[in-house]
Each structure stands twice: as C-alpha cells, then as structure tokens.
Amino acid sequence: MLKARGVTRKFGGLVAVNNVDFEIPRGSISAIIGPNGAGKTTFFNVIAGIYAPTLGTIELDGKPLISPPTGAGREPILLVVPMIPFVGLAVYFLIAVGGDTGLVEGVASVAVALLGFVGALLLNIVRPTWYNRLIKRIGVTRPARPNDMVVAGLARTFQNIRLYKSLTTLENILVGMHVHMHGTFLGALFKTRQVREEEAAAEQRARELLAFVDLAGMENELAKNLPYGKQRLLEIARAIASRPKLLLLDEPAAGMNPKETEEMTALIRRIRDELGITVLLIEHDMRVVMGISDHITVLDHGEKIAEGLPKEIRTNPKVIEAYLGRGAAAGH
Amino acid sequence: MATASVTSSTAGRLLGNLRLPFGILVFLGLSLGVLGIDQFVNALTLGAIYALVALGYTMVYGIIELINFAHGDVFMVGSFVAMFISSSLLGNEGSITSIPLLAVSVLVLFALTISVMSLVGALIERLAYRPLRRAPKLAPLITAIGVSFILQNIIQFFFGPTIVTVPQLVPVEWSIQVAGSRVPLLNLFVIATSVVLMVALQLFISRTRTGRAMRTTSMDRDASSLMGVDINRTIMITFLIGSGLAGAAGVVHGLYYGNTTFSLGFQSGLKAFTAAVLGGIGNTAGAALGGFLIAFVEVGASAFGYGRWGGAVVFSLLVIFLVFRPTGLLGSHTGDRA
Amino acid sequence: MSGIADAVSAPFAPVRAYFRRHRSFGIFVGVVLLSIALPLLTRVPPFDGIQSTNAWVNAFTTAAIYAMLAMGLNVVIGFAGLLDLGYAAFFALGGYTYAFVASPFTGVHLPFWPMLLAGGVVGAIFGVLLGAPTLRLRGDYLAIVTLGFGEIVPITLMNADKFTDGVNGIGGIDKPSIPGVLQFTLTNPWPMYGLVIALFTLIMIMIYRLEDSRLGRTWDAIREDELAAESSGVNIVIAKLQAFAVGASIAGIVGVVNAAKITIVTPDQFRFAVSISALAAVVLGGMGNTIGVATGAFIIYLFQSILLKQLNTLVENFNIPVLNQIDFLEFQYVLYGIVLVLMMLKRPQGIFPARRRMREFAPLKIGKGGLK
C-alpha cells in the first residue's frame, strides 16, 4: 500500500535516514523498531509530511505521494510572472492617459497593480491543486505539508501527545474530522441547513469514535484533565476521525503500565480488523511489537538492517547487535 | 526545523570571515562616493546612535527572547534625563568652550544619565517582565508595549508633545577639515563614544564571569542555572547594561541634534530594532553592524529626496528580513527553540 | 464573580436557557434593550448634568464604533491567536476608501450603503495582503511585522499627497442617507446611533456564529498547537488568512462608518495609539470573549472620555493647586499602557475570560492522574 524507495533525509551534514526502502502491505500492522537515534522518528516524520526527503520517493496505492522538492530556485519567478499582466495593464493605462493622469486614474492603476500583486501572492501561498499542476510543468514541486498527507489518507499520533489541551475531547475529535467536512464560510455565517446537519452528523460520529476507544461519557472533559492513558486514546480517536487509509502511531504504548499496554494492543488490532485501517507503528515496547505486528522493519543509524516476521527479527543477530552490542550478539 | 538556522549561522560566520570585511569596505567606499563626506559622516554618526540602542534590544532578546518594546523609550527618557541634567543641574544653556569644564560636564552627564537609565531599565524588568517569565511569550510582549506607552505618555505629559531643546554642550562649530569638507568634532565625538562603549561591552561579555554567564544563559537557561548561574541576577545585569547603553545613546542624541521629543523612542526604537534583526538578533556584533546599515539606508534615502519615506523604507526592510532571513546577516545567537 | 451572577440570575433560568438556544435573537434583544436604556439613563442625575443627551448619544456611538473594532481585533488575537499590532491600518484603509469615493476631493460621490460592503471587501483584501508574509512567523515576530505594516500604511497615506492630500486628509465626506426617509445630519446624532447599533448587532451575531463554526474550531486548534492541527489535516495557511481577512474586513466596514460619522479622515487618526487602544480593550475585556471585549471597549472609552473630563472639572472647581494645571484628558494614553501592564500581570485572561481561555489559564485538576 505504501512504498518508500530510497528515502534519505539529511540535516546539514548529518544523515538521519539513509536510503531506506520500505513497503507496507495493505491491511497489515507493521512496526519500525531500532535503538534510540536510529532515525525511526525522522523516517516517520518524512512519511507524515513534516520533513521533505532529501532523496527518494514515497508512493501511496501506486500514486506518488512524496518526493524531494525541486526547482526551488525558480520560485521567485512564480511570484513575479502572474503579476506581469496586471502591472503591465496598469503601466499601459498610465502611459495612455499620459500627463492627464487624474486622481481616479491614478488610484485605479494602483488598484489594478495591487490586485495583480495580491493575486500572485495568494496563488503562491494557497497553492490550489491546479496551480501546483501548472508549476510542476516548469519543474517546480513544493514539499508536501502534513495536512496534504491527511487529505491523501494518512493520519498520525505523536510521541509526546499533542492534543488541544483546552478543548474538550469531543472538540478534539471534531477537529480531526474537518478534512471531510464541507461547510462553507457563508454557510457558517448564516447557519444554513447544510451546515447545521453536517455539524450534527459530525458530533454524532465523534461520539461513536469516543465510544470506540472506550472514552464514552467523557465528551465534555477537557483534554488536559484526562489521565495520561486516556489522552493517548483520545489522540488515536482524533487520528481515526479523518478516515485514514494508513494510521501512523508514534510510540503509542510509551509510558503505559501493563494493563494499559494490553488495552492499547487490543485497540490497535480492532482498528485494523473493524475499521480496515492499515497501521504503522514505532515502538520500543517489544511485547507490543512482537505481539501484534505482521511485519517488522529494523533501523539502525538511519539504515535498514533487517526486516521480516517477528520471529525472524527476534533471532536476527544484526538486530541483537544493534540493541545490545557486539558481545551480546556473539554470545547468542 | 531548528537545524536550518544553525547551518546558516555557521555558514554565515565561516564565509563572513572573508566576505564580510570586504563587503563592508566596498559598501563604505561606495557610500562615500555616493553621499559625499558630509552625509557619510552623518550616516556614521546616526549609525553610532542606532548601534548603541540596538545592542540593548539584541542582548535582551538573546537572553530572554523578549522584544523589549520599552527599550526605545528608555533611550528617549535617557535623552530627557540628559536634557534635564544639563540644563538644570549643570546649569548650561549652550555650549561650553573651556575644554576641562566641557570634559567634566560631559562625564558627569554620562555618568548620571547612564546610572539613572540603568536603574530604570532594571526596575522595569523586575516589576513588569520577571513575573511573566514563565508565561506564554505574548504576555510579556503586551506588557512591554504597555510600559512603552506609559513611558512615552508620562514624558509627553510633563514635557509636552512638541520638540524640546537640549543644550548642546559640545560646540557645534568645532570642526576639522577632511578632504575639503568640514567635519564637526561633535560627530567624531559621538562616533568615538559609541565605539568605545561597544568595545567595552564586547570585552565585558567575552572576558568576565558575568559576561560568560550572560552568554550561557542566552544559550540554555536551565542548564546555566544548574551550573550555578544566578539567572535573575544575570538577566538583571543584562537589562542594566542594555538600558545604560540606551541612556548613553540618549545623551549623545541630545548633544548631537540639540533636541528631543517624546516620540523619539517609538520611531528610532523601531529602527534600532530593525538594525538588531538585520544584524542577527542576539548577536552583539550584528547589532552594531545593523545600526550602521540602517543609518546609511536612512541617510541615503534622504540624500535622494525620499526623506519622508525613510521610515517606511526601514520598516519594509524589517518585514523583508523577518520573513525571508530572520537570522539576520551575521546569524542569530539565541537558544534554538524546539 | 460568576458565582454571584449565577445566584442572581437563577430565577431567570428558563429565560437564559431559551436565549442560549436562540442566541442571535438574544443578542438582538439585548442590544436593543441596552441601546434604549442607555440614552434614557442619561436623562437622570448625575448623568444629565455631565452633558446633554445628544452629546451622550454621540459618545455611545463612538464607543460602539470602538467596541466593534475591539470585536474585530478579538477575532484575530483571541480566536486565532495572532497578535496583530497594526490593526489601525485596516481601519484607515476602510475610511480612506470611502472618503475617496464620497467627497469633493475626487468629485466622485458613490452612495454610502454599498460602500459599507466595499469597505469590508477592501479590508479583507488588505487583511490577506498584510497577513500573508506573517504566516510562518513566531508570535513576537508576527507582532512586529504587523506593527511595521501598521506604521507603513499611515506613513504612505501621509506621503502620497497626490492621492490622499497628505497630512490634511480628506474632508467633507458625505453622510449616509436613505432618500426620502432619513437624513443623517451633523447635529442629530440619533440616525447614526441607530445605524451603528444595528451594525454592532449584526457584527456580534456573525462573530458568535463564526466562533461556533468549523472555522472557529480550526482557529482554536491552531492557537493550541499548530503542528498538531496541521497533522489533523487543517490547512493552516488558509485558516490564518481567513482570520486576518475577517478581522480586517470588520475594521474596514467600521472605517467606512467612522469616516461618514466624522466626515474627515486624516493619517493622524490612525496612529499606533489606535491599534493599542483596540488591544487594550481586548486585553481588558478578555481575549476570545466577544461580549467581554465589547464591554472592555465601552469601559475604556467611557472612562477616558467621561471620567477624565469629569476629573478635570472637579479639580478646576475645587481649585486644587497642582492638579488643576493638568489636563487629565492627556492621561488617556497612559491609561492604555496601564491597562495592558496591569491586566497582563494580574489577570491575563481579562475581566470576562472566554470560557476556553479560562481553561487555558486555570490550574490543572490534579487527582485523576492528569499531571502534565
């Protein structure tokens, strides 16, 4: 389902991820493991659209998703070119009117030039899809942003939980659903029927999601007042809310006691089994990893050193060496 | 995310060793040719004043990541304090021609003004900023704006909204001849004062324990406190020094222009802040460089007849730098925020 | 404070519940009642001694204009969390746009009512234009850039003599009129009062609806955690631009009204102090709380225009030696500064904290293990 080829990410001189090939089969629960500093989170963040890859591409369902940004040098052209017709018009106008440039003509010219400027600026900032396709023709591809990933069908959680702390659990989930909601600005201002119905339906679904992660009854609790374990569940609920095809979980079991870990494992399985969402997780807790993963990839120092089924990884000498050092590997 | 800025500041410093002095010389040469000696000296003088004020901005931002909005007004109050001292205490209404008397008066003026303004700055820190040190960043910024407003309007209240004359103790007529043009000694005095103070600051920061404490606190406050640095004291000293420099700039401003007004802080303060950003916020050498650059831009704009637009040009520079190159020309020296 | 309010209004519970569900109607009723009650109040002592009812009504109108500015700024600062220090620029642009097409300066005389809308559009365009460069900046840098723009606009207005008559500004601006029905004159403040109150109600209703909408929630998310919001699928760029656009268009509309009321626009009317006064109202009233900031604006305006004037008459009448040399009206700017400093130090959430802001500043509930 997701294919990463040759993904490399450099930070200045530091190579955090080096030429990693990676494939996630649809409907699987895959895991990335590796010692600290192996580049797992960086790789994760590349898939999530937070970092652009220095090299390599990522495909989702056969369609290109992420590739290194190109043509950055040509960006200023993008700003200037759309302005030219407008500024040209303004200048021509001024010349045609000549010395008789009255007040109104002057302002009108400025207004037209300004319009061109605003238009160009807006295009460059908002980057509607047709504009992106257009500029791809001249060789400019812009790095993908995390919200583009969500639109494409990815969703993620964070290692150190990033909830909207002062919002209620319901509101947190609703934000996750925005990507599929179509109420317009004017619709909101005039409280049209479409908007009201959409909001009601969204709220209903949000409640269902809360129940799915066992948080029913806590709709109006502020996110920051939830205990740690429940915050993790809420973040997952928010991620699922955007109806992703692929869910990226960054250390979902971190900081949890055994019972909570068990519940989390069961939840992840249910997400795959009942909701049909493919899951990719980073995890340090080997019980979780070995327990639910169909497929494990091991990174060390930014490179892939092993991949395969859990029982293969468990006995792989390179993996043991990476975690425990050369002596331990030899001892096995 | 944070790493990009590390790279550019390192690159900036490596290349800067070669590129920068050369660039500066070229720039100075060109300006001299374009502006002529008179305006060139004016630009240097204005730059000296801006640099002194910019230092305060940059040091405070470097250490607590706060844009001290009130700093420009500390500069302004300093000029009023100097005016008050020289006209009331020293009893002077015009220039002093006797050199020993002049030297003493000027020294007294500096000593008193700098002391007073240092205390004012430290007081502001203690009362308005320190309680908000752990608050979200917007809170002390809004407070700083409030303090700035209070200062401006207290001065306006007591001294009126118009321009107030300041005794120019150093006679304006004293001058030397350079390449056919008359260069007033006053200008040289301002430039020299500024350079001396900047060098003293640089020595202080690099050679003394407190200076070192200031540098480490701006890089990593928590680690510094774990190493035994008294954070409150270090920050207070930063404010003392920054405000003292602003006070000195106030003295110098009054002596040079012969006048001051309540809105001086707002206008010049924002320009000095632009200078700090231009040079690289948190970077003292950058603040100095930025100060002179901004002055040249302003004087240049005047020379070409666009004096009224000077403010808009400088603010536009500020916007451009903040958006496209927030680390400034020489790289910024604040602790990287995650 | 809320405990007392709750106790007092307990018997009115069913009424409150009704208005909570039909909030727009509630706002309408509330504003209408208030706008009738206030002028009536000025007929009784001690208020009738201070100034005539007409003068009071004029003051209320100005206060309402100021309150609308505060509500607009609140959308940018309170909802989206973007510290805009150059808000007066949009106010200026709205005013000058109308002045340009409704005064002897250009000779063009377009009618007022469509220009109200045009003011909003101009505001929105400039809101996007001036907001765009700030999109990736941190809070304090964003503030400075907006401040820079807030300075560039009046400087430009002042210096582009040919287009704006520089320092003199544009005068003789047309007043609005409903032909045959209503004439707005310089001496009768009531039509303008009615217009402003109607606009105030409309804007307040619209802002509340936005706050509860998907966009309002998006702004909350951005304010809380931008990275998380983006990873939830929120388009940060568009949402921030929308905040700027909404805030600026409100200022634009209010600018048109203000120009029509005062009949003259000069660059001096739109200095930094104006942006700061709006900020003070927002900070005082409660960032994020629409009614709160409107109230904050009223308090500040009435304080500075009425109370300070009274202080002047008081010290004059009693002939207090040093104080009667002072013109207390000058204090109004110090007032803004003091409000900002005191509120930030003592009660940053404002007098009337927004429900959500109260939670942000409130201590964590410890007990369920939520120690973060």
Image (cartoon, coloured by chain):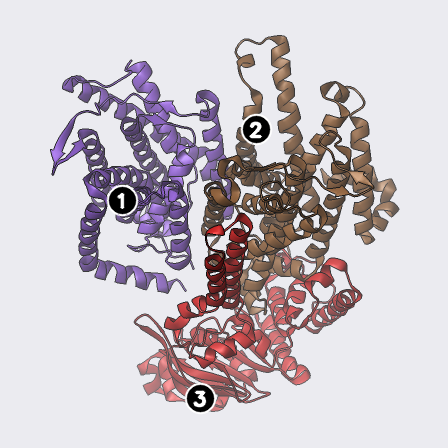
Chain colours: A red, B purple, C brown
Q: Secondary structure at mark 3?
A: strand
Amino acid identity at mark 1: Phe
Is residue B106 at least partly visible in the picture? yes
Separation of disc 2 and disc 1 at Cα? 36 Å
Badge number at residue A173 = none
Residue matched to label 2: C332
**Residue A167 at x, y = what percent?**
65, 57
**In this view of the protein, which residue sits in the foreground, A24 or A124?**
A124
Residue A162 horizontal side relative to residue C137, left or right: right
Amino acid identity at mark 2: Gln
**In this view of the protein, which residue sits in the foreground, A298 or C69?**
C69
* Viewer-side label of 2, 3: 2
**Residue C244 at x, y = what percent?**
58, 54
For the residues tagged 2 and 3, is the chain the same?
A: no
Q: Secondary structure at mark 2?
A: helix
* Viewer-side label of 1, 3: 1
Residue matched to label 3: A307
Graded by Cα atoms within 10 Å as few (under 14), some (14 to 19) or many (20 or more), the crowding at tag 2 reads some
**Residue B315 at x, y = what percent?**
41, 47
Amino acid identity at mark 3: Glu
The picture quadrant where one finds residue B245 is top left
